[in-house]
Structures are given as structure tokens and as C-alpha cells.
Image (tube, rainbow, N blue to C red):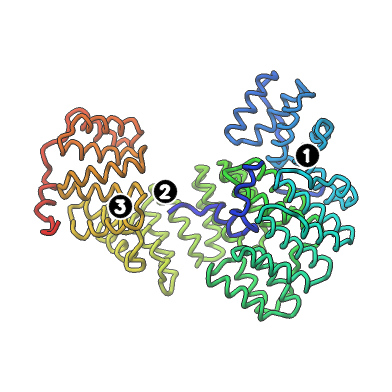
């Protein structure tokens, strides 16, 4: 199982709609505690050196370094518009907002309609409540659908700031564009109605937004909050219950439900036009985020600039930096999530996994130990500790962590298969097969159609020359559940090999290699099967390829032996397998 991810948390934070604007890119001074300090040092000492360094950093999606090198290059050629654009954009995408503001002055002189430059100026004015300046600089005529929507939202919020709610709503209603506009315009219209003191009108807009996208938790929460404030708690709870039937136990939905049930006073979604625009930029920035897209980074940092306390933006930025491989900066953002957030516990767990990704094992363990000390029954913390230790081949300690997690549970549920599965792996790696098999079968009892368990248990049985018929059935089932998983297809090929059914082994192992061409062991397995069917040149080719794919040292030794000597006569294990082979096989 993969480690917990900031991407998971970003999905939990639920922007309005990510899929809705997936095609957009194809068409196209308050305290900020989570913004990084501007970079200050560069080893390049020429225009060419800084430019080439900037391009390399940009290719690596290292926006922080790209911002430094582009700005240094700009000092050598201050009138170069390309360098102005890149230095500004990278400063904004890396969160150096003050630096971006300074760079935007010359940029906008050269191109007064520069998209991100104009958006930064608009954000500055919204933050300073200079609503007239926002309206003077409106940019709604752009042919880019993302720009047109963004500036229309900004203009609507500026009108709301001036107290002209009617014009604000009309701007949103009259905006023509792609069908995905509707969710954003309706949701923001609801926020404007709510901020203007018209809860009934707000409820209508939120209802239409939620109907436009029933998967939008953000619209649902706004609607539920609005209904509750209007004394319609029952209706709000019914909406939440319907959502939880589809997405059970979502932390934000659970928090809202508990607050309504307890009769708590719910805070409004936003309290100012700047916060409204921050919310919009968060939703748009999250929706267009594709593998660390710089435009997404700029949107999210502008959201944080307008509302540094918006937890959803903070989590989305952590997600973005995780994608960029900058786990240290991702941790900085995760640490800023407020204690009141229902996602706080998940962010703390994720911080530990990031420490592990940074090879800071002791810090990861200490962080989880702090969580466990605060709550000894924290199953997630014990499980994550087990996962980290298992990833470090500390199988004895990992087993103990999983055991503690299982001991905490008064009653096991279907989802607890994963604890038995991981503990089974830890025990198998310690050569404790009886206990490992006990765990793997317990996992399978809880989740009989779990392909990872079926594959691991089936492969382990085959590897030990045990229960070939049962193992074959398990792995066939796993392949039917995950037909494109190269590792599971490899297991099927290998069980055929161990059964002496070499032609079938070749067929499945060739498919496994096509799915996982760079895995050394799968290539080695295919080489073995080729040898057994008499294709000895093909076998040595595959073994040589496996050698070049950086296998583990013990595997390399075995592969080199095969390259030199080929396979020895049929092993006693294969003979035994044939003897044990079921009659109908």
C-alpha cells in the first residue's frame, strides 16, 4: 500500500471541481506565515549562466531556484520581456509574493494585460479593499476561459465589496462559457448572497451549485451551513446523510454533522470579498493542478496571500510540493494547518511519512511517538509507524507496531485486512512463515477478493512448494481483479513455471514484462521460462537485460550465474510441483 499522501488530503479538502476544468490549460502586506523567504544566493555569474541554470531548474520544476536564477539573469538584461515574465511568474509560483509584486511593475508596463501580473494587482487591491481599482482593471474580455472566469469572479467580489450585490450576481449570471463555469458562478453567487445578508437567496444558489455537481463537498458544506443558520437543521442533516452514503466518514462532513447535532453556532464560509476570492482561487488552482503545474502554484499562492488561514489552500500547497518532490516545504505547509481542522490529524500523520521520504527516520519515529503519547489508541499512528519501519526493512519493529494497532481494536472490520496483510509481510520477511500465513489468511477472511493478499499468499505458497492448486486459484483470481498489474501477472506466470507448464508461463510472463518492462525480477523470470522452452538465446538476452536494470545485490549474483552457466537441470522443486499438480491442471 502506498504511504498516505498530501494528494489524498487535497482531495479530502475538496475544491469545487477538478475534473470540470481539466481542459482549461489546453486553451490556454499582511503576515504570510507559510510563504517562503525569497532566495538570496546564486553561483552563476553571467547572463548565460543564470539563464541556463534557470532553465534547468524550471525543467526540474524547482520553482524556488528558477525564481532566483531568472531574477539574476534579469539584472544583466532588465528590458528583456521574456526574463521579466519568467522571473515574475517563478517568484509567484514559489510563493515569494512580495518579490513578485516588485517584479510586476516593469512587467505590466511592457504588457498591461499580462494575465498573472494583472491577477496579482487585482488580488492586491481586493486585499486592500480598493474595490474601485479592481473594477477599473477588469479583464473579462480575455479569450482564455480560465482568465475570463477568474476576472469575472474578481469583479463580482469587488462589486460585493462596494455593496452592489445586484451587479455582482448579474455578472456571474450573465457570464457565458464552458458548462463547468456554472458550478463556480453559482457557488460564488451563494457566497456573495450570504455575505450580503440574504440567506434564503444564498441557499438557492448553493442548492443549484450542489445539483450541478453532487460530488462537490464544498458546495454541500456551504449549503448545510446556510440551512442551519436559517433554522433548517433537519434539512441540512438530511443533505449530509445523503452525501455520507456515497462518501462515508469524510472528516469535513462528519465535523459539520457533529456541529449541527450539537447545536453549535456555525461560522460563515467567508467574511470578506478577499476571503471569497481566496476561496475561488483555491478551487481553481486545485482543479488545474496537474503534476505541479506552475499556473496552479500561482493560483494557490495568491489564495494564501488573500487568506493565509484557509486550511484547504495550505493542504493543496502541501500536495503540490509533494508532487514536486520537495517534502521539506510540504512539511512547512502541513505544519500550518490549524488545530481546529478535522484534517489536522491526517496532516500530522503525513508529516511523519515526509520525514521518512527525506531519510529522516528518527524524526519520523519521534513525530509518531509524540502522537501516540498524546493518544495511545491512535491506530493510524501505530499503523504508519509500522509502514515506515517495514519500508526500512525493520520487520521485527514493524510487526510490533502492527500488533499494537490490532490490539487496540475492540472489533475488527473489513478494512482491517490491511493490518493483517502488512504484519503478515513483516513476519514472512522474518522467516516466520506459520505466523505469516496465519495473518495473510486472516486478511483474506476479512476481504476475500483483495488482490494484493491473494497474490502475496499465492506467490508465497508457490515459492515454498506448497498447495499449488490453491495458490493457482488465488493468483488467477487476483489477475482477474487486476489484469494490468504486472506484478500479479508475473505471479501467475511464475506459478505456471513452478508447475512445469512452461508454455503458459512464457505467455503470462511476456505479458508481465510488457506491463512492467523495467522490473529486473520479472525479466529474469521470463528468461527462465524461455530457457525451459528451448529459447536459450532469448533467455540470455532477458537475463542480460535484468542485470542492467539494477537488481538487488543477491539477485544480481543469481542472474550473473544464469548468464554464465544457464539453468541447471530441472530442480527437485519443479519435479515435486509436477507430482503435486492437480489432475485437472
In terms of image quadrants, where is residue 532? top left
| Along the viewing direction, whichever of 460 and 59 lies nearer the viewer | 59
- Comparing labels 1 and 3, the label whose residue is closer to the camera: 1
| 316, 296: nearer the viewer | 296
Q: In percent of the image, x 78 and y 39: which residue is there?
A: 117
Image x and y of residue 121, in percent: 82, 43
Question: For mark 2, what is the residue?
Answer: 391
Using a 10 Å C-alpha cutoff, classify the residue at mark 2 as few (fewer than 14 neighbours), some (14 to 19) or many (20 or more).
some
Distance from the alpha carbon under mark 2 to that under mark 3 = 14 Å
Q: Residue at x 67, y 53 (%)?
A: 178
Depth check, front residue: 460 or 249:
249
Instruction: Name the N-terminal-most of marks 1 and 3.
Output: 1
The residue where tag 3 is placed is 430
Label 1 sits on residue: 117
Drawn side of residue 71 relative to residue 469, left or right: right
Q: Quadrant of the N terminus?
A: bottom left
Q: Earlier in the sequence, mark 2 or mark 3?
A: 2
Q: Position of residue 161 (x, y in %)?
A: 86, 58
User: For numbered disc 3, what is the local secondary structure?
Assistant: loop
* Residue 14 image position (x, y, % from top left): 62, 59
Mark 1 crowd level (few <14, some 14–19, many ≥20, 10 Å Cα): many
Q: Quadrant of residue 405?
A: bottom left
Q: Residue at x 89, y 50 (%)?
A: 130
Report the side of 169 relative to 548 (left or right).
Answer: right
For the question of whether residue 295 can be seen, the reply is yes
Q: Is residue 313 visible?
A: no
Dot 3 crowding, Cα within 10 Å, few <14, some 14–19, many 20+: some
Amino acid at each position: 500500500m502506498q504511504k498516505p499522501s498530501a494528494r489524498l488530503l487535497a482531495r479530502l479538502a475538496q475544491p469545487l471541481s477538478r475534473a470540470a476544468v481539466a481542459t482549461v490549460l489546453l486553451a490556454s502586506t499582511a503576515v504570510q506565515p507559510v510563504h517562503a523567504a525569497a532566495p538570496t544566493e546564486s553561483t552563476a555569474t553571467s547572463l548565460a549562466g543564470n539563464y541556463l541554470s534557470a532553465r534547468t531548474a524550471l525543467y526540474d520544476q524547482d520553482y524556488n531556484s528558477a525564481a532566483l536564477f531568472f531574477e539574476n539573469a534579469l539584472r544583466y538584461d532588465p528590458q528583456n520581456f521574456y526574463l521579466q515574465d519568467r522571473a515574475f511568474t517563478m517568484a509567484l509560483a514559489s510563493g515569494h509574493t512580495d518579490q513578485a509584486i516588485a517584479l510586476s511593475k516593469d512587467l505590466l508596463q511592457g504588457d498591461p494585460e499580462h494575465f498573472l501580473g494583472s491577477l496579482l494587482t487585482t488580488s492586491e487591491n481586493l486585499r486592500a479593499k480598493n474595490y474601485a481599482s479592481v473594477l477599473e482593471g477588469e479583464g473579462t474580455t480575455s479569450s482564455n476561459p480560465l482568465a475570463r472566469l477568474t476576472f469575472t469572479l474578481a469583479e463580482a467580489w469587488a462589486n460585493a465589496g462596494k455593496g452592489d450585490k445586484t451587479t455582482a450576481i448579474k455578472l456571474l449570471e450573465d457570464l457565458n462559457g464552458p458548462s463547468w463555469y456554472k458550478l463556480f458562478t453559482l457557488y460564488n453567487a451563494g457566497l456573495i448572497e450570504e455575505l450580503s445578508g440574504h440567506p434564503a437567496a444564498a441557499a438557492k444558489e448553493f442548492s443549484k451549485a450542489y445539483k450541478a455537481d453532487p460530488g462537490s463537498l464544498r458546495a454541500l458544506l456551504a449549503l448545510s451551513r446556510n440551512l442551519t443558520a436559517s433554522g433548517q437543521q433537519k434539512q441540512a442533516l438530511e443533505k449530509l446523510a445523503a452525501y455520507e452514503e456515497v462518501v462515508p466518514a469524510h472528516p469535513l462532513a462528519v465535523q459539520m454533522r457533529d456541529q449541527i447535532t450539537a447545536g453549535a453556532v456555525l461560522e460563515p464560509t467567508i467574511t470578506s470579498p478577499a476571503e471569497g476570492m481566496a476561496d475561488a482561487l483555491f478551487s481553481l488552482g486545485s482543479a488545474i493542478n496537474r503534476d505541479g503545474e506552475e499556473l496552479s502554484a500561482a493560483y494557490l499562492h495568491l489564495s494564501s496571500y488573500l487568506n493565509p488561514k484557509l486550511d484547504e489552500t495550505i493542504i493543496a500547497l502541501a500536495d503540490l510540493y509533494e508532487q514536486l518532490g520537495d517534502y521539506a516545504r510540504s512539511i512547512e505547509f502541513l505544519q500550518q494547518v490549524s488545530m481546529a481542522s478535522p484534517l489536522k490529524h491526517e496532516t500530522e500523520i503525513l508529516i511523519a511519512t515526509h520525514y521518512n521520504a527525506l531519510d529522516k527516520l528518527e524524526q519520523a519515529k519521534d513525530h509518531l511517538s509524540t502522537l501516540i503519547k498524546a493518544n495511545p489508541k491512535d491506530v493510524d499512528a501505530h499503523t504508519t509507524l509500522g509502514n515506515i519501519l517495514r519500508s526500512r526493512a525493520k520487520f521485527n519493529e514493524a510487526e510490533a507496531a502492527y500488533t499494537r494497532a490490532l490490539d487496540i481494536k475492540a472489533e475488527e472490520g473489513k478494512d482491517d485486512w490491511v493490518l493483517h496483510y502488512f504484519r503478515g509481510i513483516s513476519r514472512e520477511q522474518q522467516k516466520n512463515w506459520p505466523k505469516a500465513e496465519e495473518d495473510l489468511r486472516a486478511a483474506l477472511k476479512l476481504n476475500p477478493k483483495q488482490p494484493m493478499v491473494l497474490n502475496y499468499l499465492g506467490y508465497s505458497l508457490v515459492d515454498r512448494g506448497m498447495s499449488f492448486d490453491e495458490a493457482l486459484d488465488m493468483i488467477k483470481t487476483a489477475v482477474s481483479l487486476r489484469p494490468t498489474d504486472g506484478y500479479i501477472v508475473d505471479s501467475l506466470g511464475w506459478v505456471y513455471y513452478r508447475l512445469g507448464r512452461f508454455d503458459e508461463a512464457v505467455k503470462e510472463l511476456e505479458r508481465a514484462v510488457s506491463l512492467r518492462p523495467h522490473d529486473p525480477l520479472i525479466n529474469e523470470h521470463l528468461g527462465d521460462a524461455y530457457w525451459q522452452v528451448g529459447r536459450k538465446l532469448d533467455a540470455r538476452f532477458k537475463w542480460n537485460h535484468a542485470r542492467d536494470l539494477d537488481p538487488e545485490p543477491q539477485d544480481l549474483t543469481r542472474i550473473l550465474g544464469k548468464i554464465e552457466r544457464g539453468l541447471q537441470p530441472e530442480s527437485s522443486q519443479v519435479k515435486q510441483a509436477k507430482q503435486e499438480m492437480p489432475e485437472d491442471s
